[in-house]
Image (cartoon, grey):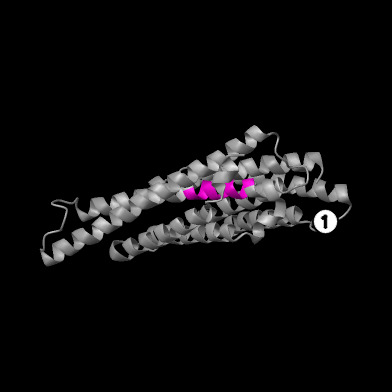
Amino acid sequence: MQEMSLFWLRVAAVSYTACLVYVLDYLFRRGTVLRRPATAVFCVGAILHFVAVVEGSVAVGHLAAQEFHQTVTLLALVLSISFLAVVWIYEFESLGLIAFPLAAALTWMGALTAPDARWAGSGLRDAWLLGHVLLNIGGFTSTLFMALASLFYLAQERHLKTKEPIRFFTHLPPLHLLDQLSTRAMFTGFAFTTFGVIAGTGWAILESGAKWIGEGRVHISLFTWAFYLAVVLLRTSAGWRGRRAAFLAFYVLLFSTLTWFSHTGLRPLLAK
């Protein structure tokens, strides 16, 4: 991919990433004020994305879709255009909650796997990896709080139904406060996990190219994130609360723990 094509692709990726502010605002506050501005920024990103693909195709003399980074870039563009078409025809702007992070992740993947995309220096490499680790720590801590709040929710619910005293605890907050704590911890954990997966994927791409796709720990991370996303959608869209939401929190913690153990190999890398 030529230099200008890669430049415009990176600008498009930044534009898509900026739209995640709306996603986070909706998840944490159910805010919709940023929906249309985010869609407008996404549209600008799609235009720049199209320019990048056209310049890359002109440079090679045919549609740039042979190599891995070209295929991912083209896929991200098709998804972006499809999303804008759906918004224009059906006014389904809420679809951006899924389209924005997906387009940002795929576009960054294409930009970072391009032949000209390499580490500018060891300092950037170490800082990027450290940021990935800190994001994962934040995600795991929030997930742990979500699971603990869910555990106390089940204990308090049982106490209210059976009137039996709760061992080890003389007083627990009301059910609605425990559910609120669990929900906020879930949103925080999902945000940390999402950015952690993006940072980790970007680091793996720059470090080993397309080989990262075959790594089992990457598969576990992506599965954990996808399950986390499903839990968020079930709690926000399907209205899952109470016992079902509590058990989902335990599964998220289980998968997050497996992901953490699968990445224990990061320690020797940090020492390089």
Q: Tell me where residue 263 appears, x and y as whole percent.
A: 53, 52
Q: Residue at x 44, y 44 (%)?
A: 138
Apparent side of residue 134 relative to residue 41 in the rendered image (left or right): left
Depicted 206 relative to depicted 259: above or below? above
Apparent side of residue 261 relative to residue 199 in the rendered image (left or right): left
Res. 41 image quadrant = top right
From the image, which quarter does the C terminus lie in?
A: top right
Q: Tell me where residue 4 appears, x and y as whole percent.
A: 79, 39
Q: Is residue 92 visible?
A: no
Residue at which label 1 appears: 63
Q: Which residues are magenta?
A: 193-203
Please tell me which residue lies in front, 262 or 231.
262
Q: Residue at x 11, y 60 (%)?
A: 165
* Total count of labels: 1
Apparent side of residue 215 relative to residue 91 in the rendered image (left or right): right
Q: Secondary structure at mark 1?
A: loop
Depicted 213 relative to depicted 192: above or below? below
Q: Tell me where residue 178 appears, x and y as whole percent.
A: 26, 52
Most frequent secondary structure within the magenta stretch: helix
